[in-house]
Image (tube, helix red, strand yellow):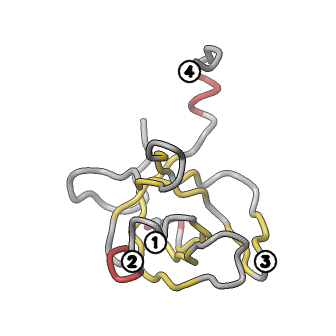
């Protein structure tokens, strides 16, 4: 179990709902991954590199609502700049990642509270 934290520290992490508007294969990544473009409403469209190709196809991702951390620094992955961290839960053995998202239709850009 992780050490405890404070609500203030937790609230520093800006987690928002976004809708995947585009996804494509990312052959230059070291591990199998996709390039994903996500619409966060008023925050605009942000890009992410996600190692989720074990459980999802490019077509399955389009239109899907996801949760992502939007206030981390951008990170270069091969020739692609990943601007947000899409959230997921590893399956047993940490081999595949299941995406985390709302179970109902809600507008992109809303913040997790």
Instruction: Give the CA distance from mark 4 to mark 2.
Output: 36 Å
Write down the residue under mark 3: 78
Q: Which of 2 and 21 is in front in this view?
A: 2
The residue under the point 57% across, 51% down is 69
Please rate how many residues cluster around mark 2, counting C-alpha atoms within 10 Å: few if below 14, some from 14 to 19, many from 20: some
**x and y percent of residue 83 in the render?**
67, 66
Judge whether 24 appears above or below 67 on screen.
below
Write down the residue under mark 4: 7
First in residue order: circle 2 vs circle 3: 2
- Report if the CB atoms under discs 3 and 1 are less than 8 Å apart: no
The mark found on residue 57 in the picture is 2
Please rate how many residues cluster around mark 3, counting C-alpha atoms within 10 Å: few if below 14, some from 14 to 19, many from 20: few
Please rate how many residues cluster around mark 1, counting C-alpha atoms within 10 Å: few if below 14, some from 14 to 19, many from 20: many
Between circles 3 and 1, the one closer to the viewer is 3
SS class, disc 4: helix
Between circles 1 and 2, the one closer to the viewer is 2
- The quadrant holding residue 19 is bottom left
- The quadrant holding residue 46 is bottom right
SS class, disc 2: loop
- Report if the CB atoms under discs 4 and 1 are less than 8 Å apart: no
Between circles 4 and 2, the one closer to the viewer is 2
Instruction: Give the CA distance from mark 3 to mark 4.
Output: 35 Å
Judge whether 68 appears above or below 35 on screen.
above
First in residue order: circle 3 vs circle 4: 4
Q: Which of 42 and 46 is in front in this view?
A: 46
First in residue order: circle 1 vs circle 2: 1
The residue under the point 78% across, 82% down is 79
Instruction: Give the CA distance from mark 3 to mark 1.
Output: 23 Å
The mark found on residue 39 in the picture is 1
First in residue order: circle 3 vs circle 1: 1
**x and y percent of residue 49 in the render?**
62, 69
């Amino acid at each position: 179990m992780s050490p405890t934290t404070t609500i203030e520290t937790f609230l520093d992490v800006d987690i928002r709902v976004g809708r995947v508007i585009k996804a494509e294969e990312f052959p230059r990544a070291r591990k199998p991954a996709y390039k994903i473009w996500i619409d966060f409403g008023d925050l605009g469209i942000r890009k992410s590199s996600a190692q989720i190709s074990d459980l999802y196809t490019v077509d399955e991702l389009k239109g899907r609502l996801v949760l992502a951390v939007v206030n981390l620094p951008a990170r270069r992955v091969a020739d692609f700049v990943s601007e947000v961290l899409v959230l997921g839960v590893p399956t047993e053995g940490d081999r595949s990642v299941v995406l985390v998202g709302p179970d109902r239709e809600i507008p992109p850009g809303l913040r997790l509270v």
